[in-house]
Image: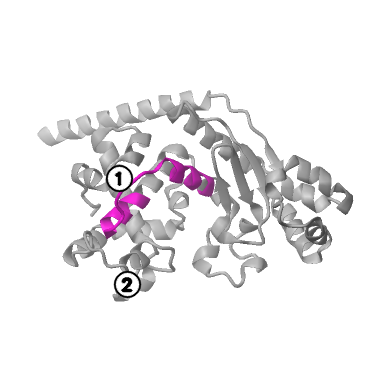
Amino acid sequence: MQLKYYIIFILGLMLVSCDKDSKVEQEIAAINIDFNVERFDKAFLEAKPNDLSQLKGAYPFLFSKHVPDSIWIHRINDTLQNELLQEVQKVFPNFKTSEEELKGLFQHLKYYDKTFKAPRVITLTNDVAYRDKTIVNDSLVLIALDNYLGASHEFYQNIPMYIGANMTKNQIVVDVTNGYANKYIFQTNRRTLLNEMIYFGKLLYFKDVMIPFKSAAERIGYTENQIKWAEANESEIWSYFIEKELLYSTDPKLPNRFIADAPFSKFYLELDNESPGRLGQYLGWQIVKAYAETTGEDVLKIMQTEPDVIFTKANFKPKK
């Protein structure tokens, strides 16, 4: 009988929590956000050399004073540039889905940060400089669409597959959210593996709160199979970190093994090739989520909380 009442109690708590979350999301959906997406990529494709001064007037921050007009005119006439821009137009004849997702992100940001103001959003290309897919600051979001043409696109043949896997349009709002997360995050210490795990765990938890309409796999940049693997092996991964005394280690090789982008995590075991990369980030994410559930703290406060406090109060227990 006691077990029966315990189950009823837990289900009741879950229903209350879901109802509260639903009300919050309804409030967020009612927030008015006014912004437009400016397609500089399309304007540049359609531009003639005589249009250059007009483009520079509308987007002065995109044109370096140290680059002469002759270089920009060459780019306007360049066949490879035009091919790149035309491919972008094929994949993004419109931007409606991503614009709706960006609106959802901005509504969430406004709910949690009353000082937030919708930025100017501009799409462009950057010659597939995939390390700089998006740029986010207080008033501006730049999105390089040539980095989101699809994982198997011919332009990405020389890019490692584990990186190319996230060069898809459904990752645009995830990457923009990561840019905002980096603006809000603060941490004085990143020397140990645990510090790094919690740092990236904060970034991922920020995505949980700000873009709940994206799946957990999309937020971390895993396939569904990869996140299922991480969930199924969470306890074993945690045990490995504990047994090898990795958490408080300052070994500079550890971030490359478990934090950085990689095709797989490096346990130096047979299971390595089965594992997704960045499993240290995944575990840090679970620790931060446990802390948030335990303390009920606001997401922006969590972003400023030191890792030792988060780890101590999280009382993290891996899934079995």
Sequence-wise, which precedes: disc 2 or disc 1? 2
Left or right side of 161 for 241: left
* Residue at 37% from the left image edge and 67% from the top image edge: 256
- Looking at the image, which residue sits at the far left? 2
Q: Quadrant of the C terminus?
A: bottom left
- Residue 30 visible in the snapshot: yes
The image quarter in which residue 253 lies? bottom left
With respect to residue 244, does 309 lie above or below? Answer: above
Tag nearer the camera, 2 or 1: 1
Instruction: Find the residue positioned furthest to the right.
Output: 50
Residue 288, horizontal then vertical, whole percent: 30, 45
> In the rendering, at what x and y percent does residue 185 appear?
39, 43
Magenta-colored segment: predominant secondary structure: helix
Q: Indicate how the structure is coloured in the image.
A: one colour
Region of the chain picked out in magenta, as a range: 175-200
Residue 27: x %, y % from top left: 47, 23
Q: Amino acid at mark 1?
A: Val
Residue at x 28%, y 32% (from the top left corner): 296
CA separation in Å, label 2 and label 1: 26 Å
Front-lying residue, 200 or 293:
200
Which residue corresponds to mark 2?
A: 271
Residue indicated by mark 1: 288
Identify whether 12 is placed above or below 232: above
| Secondary structure type for disc 2 | helix
Q: Position of residue 279 (x, y in %)?
A: 34, 60
For label 1, the SS is helix
Any magenta on residue 182?
yes
Q: Residues within 10 Å of mark 2 (few under 14, many from 20)?
A: few
Q: Nearer the viewer, residue 27 or 311?
A: 311
**In the rendered view of the protein, which quadrant contains the N terminus?**
top left
What's the residue at 54%, 51% (across, down)? 171
Q: Nearer the viewer, residue 1 or 278?
A: 278
